[in-house]
Image (tube, rainbow, N blue to C red):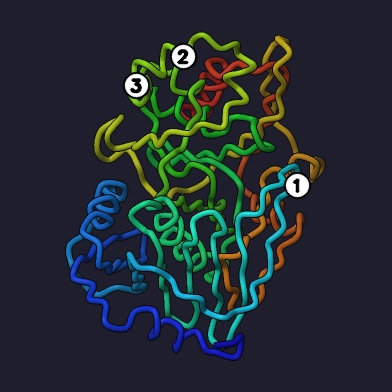
Amino acid sequence: MNDDTSLAKLVSLLSAGIATPHQVFLSMGDCRFRVMTNSANLARELTTYFAPFLRSAANADITITALQAKVPDLGLSFQVKQPDPGKTKIKEEWVDIEGGRVIRKRLTGMHFLFGKGENLAVGDCEANPNQVVNFINNRFIERKLNDGCLLAHAAGVAVCETGMAMAGFSGMGKSTLALHLVSKGVTFVSNDRLMISPGTPGPVMFGVAKHPRINPGTALHNPDLTGIISPEDTARFQSLSPEELWSLEHKYDALIDQLFGPDRFILQCPMRYLVLLNWHRDGSPTRIGEIDINERHDLLEAFMKDTGLFFAAENGYAPTAEDYARALRGCRVFEISGGVDFDQAAAGCLRLLEGA
């Protein structure tokens, strides 16, 4: 087999003779999904994870197949995806073939095939359900970007019809701030990605059905999250310094519906505010001030996001900083600077949300 092989033929080869009796039906905004799998365990994992977005069986806009199966050597010449700036580990390889793209995860051996309506995840899905979750969510992101949205690196929350996006360069704590607000009664919209649709009187933001993955420090300092960590790990983490906690790579899934109750996770809301985290762990006072984003493209870069490998553009996709600035018309933008203080930042964000 070689790179001239079509995606449709590969999908047929990999799925031949494998029944997929287990199905999960999802609704993400105006997009309906059907996920088919041969693994009852994976179906249960997905049902639990996507609980806020389950729906009854019906027609689907996007069908995804996830197979628990060994992947044979496909004979493809994969290209290496270079690590993001500041990182060294190579995680993904990819190749474009007739009809779509094949991505191989280096660490897990999972393969993802997509294009022209075909969507297949194959490999040890039961050991890597988060990668299947991400594949499903990436299909939703692709749909919204092809509909004209811009991809943003941001968390999102809402109060009634008032939405707020929170962005910042890596490690600034946008997910932690979002969870502080959810603990105060705010509705969760998205953890790390938003799709922004320009509009009048302002943009609309679309979230991704992915629960926050939080570090131990976030859980230890939020009473609503402490149950995520075992007593043994809690004791171990409490013995670490703030700097050691801050730098830990360990992550926990914080399932919004299980922690905060039903109807606390939505995927669409008018976007009235953008908060850009630009603070430092130096003990200085936290400051919140409104800015003109047209004059602060240095901060806008924290909001902009590359699509990565899991997006196939239908009509081209290459937005500029000016495109993002135009998309934010009608949205007030604030910078949080000074020292890191999540309680003070949350209180300031809540005042904005409730005072709109």
- As measured in the structure, the alpha-carbon distance from the residue carrying label 2 to the one carrying label 3 is 10 Å
Position of 280 compared to 42: left or right? right
Residue 209 place in picture, x, y as percent: 40, 50
- As measured in the structure, the alpha-carbon distance from the residue carrying label 1 to the one carrying label 2 is 31 Å
Instruction: Name the foreground residue: 322 vs 90.
Output: 90
Residue drawn at 43 percent across, 80 percent down: 117
Q: Which residue is mark 3?
A: 230
User: Callout 3: 10 Å neighbours few (<14), some, many (20+)?
Assistant: few
- As measured in the structure, the alpha-carbon distance from the residue carrying label 3 to the one carrying label 1 is 33 Å
Residue drawn at 54 percent across, 55 percent down: 195
What element does badge 3 sit on?
A: loop
What element does badge 1 sit on?
A: loop
Q: Which residue is mark 1?
A: 85
Determine if residue 266 is in view.
Answer: yes
Residue 185 place in picture, x, y as percent: 36, 26
Q: Is residue 239 above or below residue 191?
A: above
Looking at the rendered image, the disc whose residue lies closer to the viewer, 1 or 2, is: 2
Residue 329 place in picture, x, y as percent: 65, 50
Mark 1 residue type: Pro
Q: Which residue is mark 2?
A: 236
Q: Is residue 324 above or below residue 297?
A: below
Quarter occupied by residue 324: bottom right
